[in-house]
Amino acid sequence: MMSLETTVDQLPDLLIDYFGNKLNAGNIDWFVIGYKIENGISVPHVYLVDISDKATIRKNFEDATIDNGAVWDGESEILARLFRPVKIQGLDDEWIDVGHIPVSWNYMTLQDAIDFANYAIRATIDTIRFQQTEKTVGGPR
């Protein structure tokens, strides 16, 4: 049972217990995102919780380092194309780097992160709307 003292790193197990064990909900994934005070510092935690496999992966922590950035699932190709470095083929068949300006993940405020999430969702919905493919996001307006 969740209480006011429940920390972000405890939530994945609570979700697995409720949806995976009690409801047997099947193929559901959750992102659990929040902060936990560690050594007096508010530390971001991002978990992917796979209910069907009853597994949890911390997405923003590797090799004892916190990774700042964005995590998305599902229709990821559209956003990946927006943020990957790109080359174009020149007239002499040489490949030319197109200027790439990275996102300053480390300097985003919480409001910036919320705005980015809205942008990412909207860009994906609006792009797939015009593609000649199955409409897997968006739905009726």
Image (tube, rainbow, N blue to C red):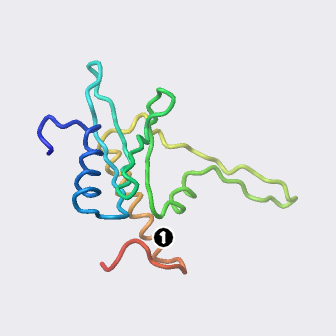
Q: Nearer the viewer, residue 67 or 128?
A: 67
Is label 1 in a helix, a strand or a loop? helix
**Residue located 43% across and 38% down the image:** 60
- Extreme left residue here? 4
Expressed as whole percent of the image width and height from the top left, the position of residue 82 reads: 55, 56
Q: How many marks?
A: 1
Bin the neighbour count of mark 1 within 10 Å (Cα to Cα): few under 14, some 14-19, many 20 and up: few
Q: Is residue 50 left or right of residue 18?
A: right
Instruction: Please tell me whether residue 137 is drawn above or below residue 118 in the rendered image.
Output: below
Q: In the picture shown, does residue 97 fall above or below 133?
A: above
Frontmost residue, 141 versus 88: 141
Q: Nearer the viewer, residue 32 or 118?
A: 32
Three-letter code, disc 1: Thr
Q: Which quadrant of the rendered structure holds the C terminus?
A: bottom left
Q: Residue at x 35, y 77 (%)?
A: 139
Q: Name the residue furthest right.
A: 92
Question: 32 left or right of 106?
Answer: left
Quadrant where the N terminus is found in the figure: top left
61 lies above or below 77: above
User: Which residue in the structure is indicated by mark 1?
Assistant: 127
Q: Nearer the viewer, residue 77 or 47?
A: 47
Taking the spot 43% from the left edge, 54% from the top edge, the residue there is 72
Q: Position of residue 117 (x, y in %)?
A: 36, 54
The picture places residue 2, in percent across and down from the top left corner, at 15, 44
Residue drawn at (29%, 51%) of the image:
16
Residue 40 placement (x, y as % from top left): 26, 19
Image position of 90 (left or right of 74): right
Q: Is residue 130 left or right of residue 12?
A: right
